[in-house]
Structure formats: C-alpha cells, structure tokens
Amino acid sequence: MSAKRAGQAPMHGSVLALLLIGAIVAGCGGGSSSPPTAPPSGPVESEPNDFIPQSLGTLSTTDIQLNGSTASARDVDLFRVTASAPVNLFVSLDWSSTSDLELAISDANGIFVRNVNTGSHPESCRLDGLPAGSYTIRVGSFTNAATPYTLTIGQR
C-alpha cells in the first residue's frame, strides 16, 4: 500500500493505519460480496464530473440512488449533496464485477472526511453528527475497465 498512485501524494504507514482504524471505528468498510439488486431508478451520472461535482441536491428522508460507471482507472466521478441540518450521512457504493472501486467523502473545504477502499464490495460508510453543509462523494477505480455501479446516499 506504500506505492504511490498516479496523482496522489505518498501516504506514510502511520497515517494509513490511523485512517484504517478510523474507518473501522466510524462504521465504514466493505460489506458482503453478494451482487447488487437491479439498479434503482433515479439520477444517472453525467460526464464530465471529474473535476466539478455533479449536484444531487439536498438530503431528505428518501435515499438518493444513482447509477454510474467508471470508464477506466483514470476516471473519477464526483457528486455533491447538501445537508440543511446536522446529519448522520450514509453512503454505499456497489457493483457486480471483480473491479476495484473506492469511495471517498470530503467536506465543502475539500478536506477528506473519510476514504473507504476495502478491496471488497459494497464499500459503505456512515458518518455520525456531520454539520450542515455540502459534501462531495468521490468514486474512483483501480481497474482499467468500464465498471457500472450503484451509489446510495442518505441519512441514517
């Protein structure tokens, strides 16, 4: 894991260990390896969204479910959601192939709140007590093949 990925700064072992411990304690991680059910209807990812996040609106009592696809290991998909009050944010990323996708969440200042890359799927995370504001969800791929996915974002 100490190898530098293209476009990323090297991560020191102690920082990586803290991130992994934080993800486990905060309820973030992989889930079962069962394939997702049929894709739900809802918003669909639209390109380009590699540098400017696609807005998905304000969180409500209904989950936002989105169908998207990474085109290659260079493709990054960014989505923005807004919480109008403090929130317990739940995000789940699922796909049905052997590809390796990752999930990351950052705040309105671009500071990463959580990174989830367990090597299994779904990748999911619940972050309790986040303040009102905008959050960006990043879907990235380590696989050089198109990978369709389903992203679910909600309050829990």
Image: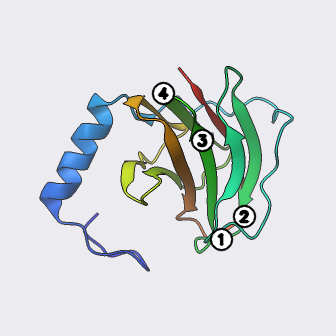
The residue that disc 2 covers is 146
Between 48 and 32, the one nearer to me in the picture: 48
Residue name at image x 54 percent, y 47 percent: 134
Of callouts 2 and 3, which one flags the residue occurring earlier in the amino acid sequence?
3
Residue that appears at 43% across and 79% down: 7
135 with respect to 114 (left or right): right
Q: Which mark is residue 82?
A: 3
Q: Position of residue 72 (x, y in %)?
A: 65, 70
Mark in the foreground, 2 or 3: 3
Element type at mark 2: loop
Residue contact between numbered discs 1 and 2, judged by CB atoms under 8 Å: yes
Q: Give the spatial CA distance, label 2 vs label 3.
A: 28 Å
Badge 3: how crowded within 10 Å, few (<14), some, or many (20+)?
Answer: some
Confirm whether residue 40 shows in the render.
yes
Type of the residue with mark 2 = Ala
Label 1 sits on residue: 72
Task: Count how many numbered circles sit on residues in the image.
Answer: 4
Which circle's residue, 1 or 2, is located before the other in the chain? 1
Q: CA distance from mark 3 to mark 4?
A: 10 Å
Q: CA distance from mark 1 to mark 3?
A: 28 Å
Q: Nearer the viewer, mark 2 or mark 4?
A: 4
Which residue is most to the bottom? 6
Element type where label 1 sits in the image: loop
Q: Secondary structure at mark 4?
A: strand
Tell which circle, 4 or 1, labels the residue nearer the N-terminal end.
1
